[in-house]
Image (cartoon, rainbow, N blue to C red):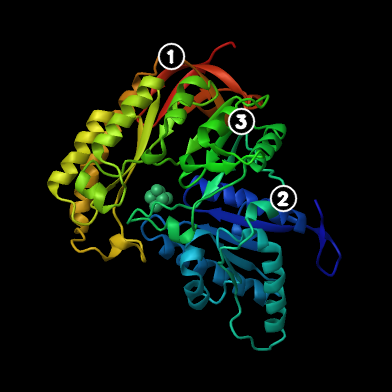
Amino acid sequence: MKDVRTGSEGQCQRKRVFIRTYGCQMNVYDSDRMADVLRPLGYALADTPEQADLVVLNTCHIREHASEKVYSELGRLRDTKAERRAEGRDLTIAVAGCVAQAEGEEIARRQPAVDIVVGPQAYHRLPELLAEAERKSAILRAGKRLPGAGVLDTEFPAESKFDHLPSPQGVRAGSAFLSIQEGCDKFCTFCVVPYTRGAEYSRPVSAVLAEAKLLVAAGAIELTLLGQNVNAYHGEAPDGSTWSLARLIRELAEIEGMARLRYTTSHPRDMDDDLIRAHGEVPQLMPYLHLPVQSGSDRILAAMNRKHTARDYLKLVERIRAARPDIALSTDIIVGFPGETERDFEATLALVAEVDFAQAYSFKYSARPGTPAAKMDEQLPEALKSSRLDRLQQLLARQTHHFNQTCVGKTFPVLFERAGRQSGQLIGRSPYLQSVHAEADSGLLGRIIPVEISGAGPNSLTGVIRAA
Ligand code: SF4
């Protein structure tokens, strides 16, 4: 690690960056990669914004009030920056991620304390953007005027950022994310991803395999393959052929030391036969699948532009369960989409009852600016959306709790990932992605250990370590 000399006493002091990550696993991956980009510039990670010379907010545009949360955080950072400047020091503020992409110029206009706005496809350029921000800041400190202080890069560059990123360092306790695909061409009417992340792009096979091998060499025994529409993966292989996600998974499973593979997030239309078969044939592919359905009403599914029906989804679930009978299914559901009637909502409840999900994420519909659904008539009142969400979540919570209860008495291989709240306790993941709490020595972090499940809560399991 390169040290950066600062201060009149000439003490050695590293620069520090604090990265706050909002939203999905893609953003967690991007935050790790931004840390990788900044490391050669001398930036070590800070635990809090107060310790940092550079704060990056890696934002998410999916959830309700996402941009408001970013602006209130920026207000706090502006105050910190003003206090620092009064003391003759500085704080550089960067906004990255999907809010940066969607509202870049608005951010620079509304919050002049922001030095850098960088979209999700351009963060490999952070070193140049930081240098430019520093140059502008020096001009301002000298009392000169500038037309707009912030540095903005929300392009979808012709070159892939993946070709310009340094080797990944982000292996935490045996598990790592690996981004294989970005963007989306599906254009669901409620979703901003096609606008913020751009068109669907699959990384070449050789790049994915090389990064996977590096991650395994750095200690990863579990890889989660990431993409906004990950099962649409169609990467170019060295021989010029195109590999599907299933083909890639089979190859990754051959890497020595690769114990577990997962992937997220999938679209039902891209679950092809080979991928379904892989669930039954590749032992490293964990028996868990996140497969968003969004609604159980064909009318609403059509309005969402999902291009599948409730029956398509149910038939797909049947085929997946035939290939891997113990698979734990997870989903995303939006309630209160514009025009959703009580009958539509009941169709969603019926689909949920039929599938019996092990896990689910459910949300009230909230309009994302610039999406077709935001302009639709028949936006539903908040109170109605809330009461429907409450009814749905009661059903989903019962299903998750029941699934957890069926695990009691079984012994699972658990990958321990982090310390628990109580001393002497670790938390790991079962093959079905449940959190498992067990008394365990911290030396077991990053290892897969057999754990007999002794208790099941609504959202997690407890267990006792068994001899391997
Ligand atoms: S498939 Fe997923 S990422 Fe693509 S538009 Fe639909 S919800 Fe968004």
What amino acid type is highlighted by mark number 3? Leu
Which numbered disc, 3 or 2, marks the residue closer to the eye?
3
Q: Earlier in the sequence, mark 1 or mark 3?
A: 3
Q: Earlier in the sequence, mark 1 or mark 2?
A: 2
Q: Is residue 431 left or right of residue 379?
A: right
Q: Which residue is mark 1?
A: 410
Residue at 71% across, 37% down? 214
Note whether residue 433 is visible: no
Q: Position of residue 372 (x, y in %)?
A: 31, 62
Which numbered disc, 1 or 3, marks the residue closer to the eye?
3
Q: CA distance from mark 3 to mark 2?
A: 21 Å
Can you name the residue that lies furthest to the bottom here? 144
Q: Is residue 52 above or below residue 225?
A: below
Q: Which residue is mark 3?
A: 252
Q: CA distance from mark 1 to mark 3?
A: 28 Å
Q: Which mark is residue 115?
A: none
Q: Which residue is mark 2?
A: 166
Contact (Cβ within 8 Å) of mark 1 with mark 3: no
Residue at 61% across, 29% down? 251
Residue at disc 1, CB closer than 8 Å to ligand 1: no
Secondary element at image label 3: helix
- Asked which quadrant contains residue 394, the reply is top left
Secondary element at image label 2: loop
Residue at 26% across, 41% down? 309
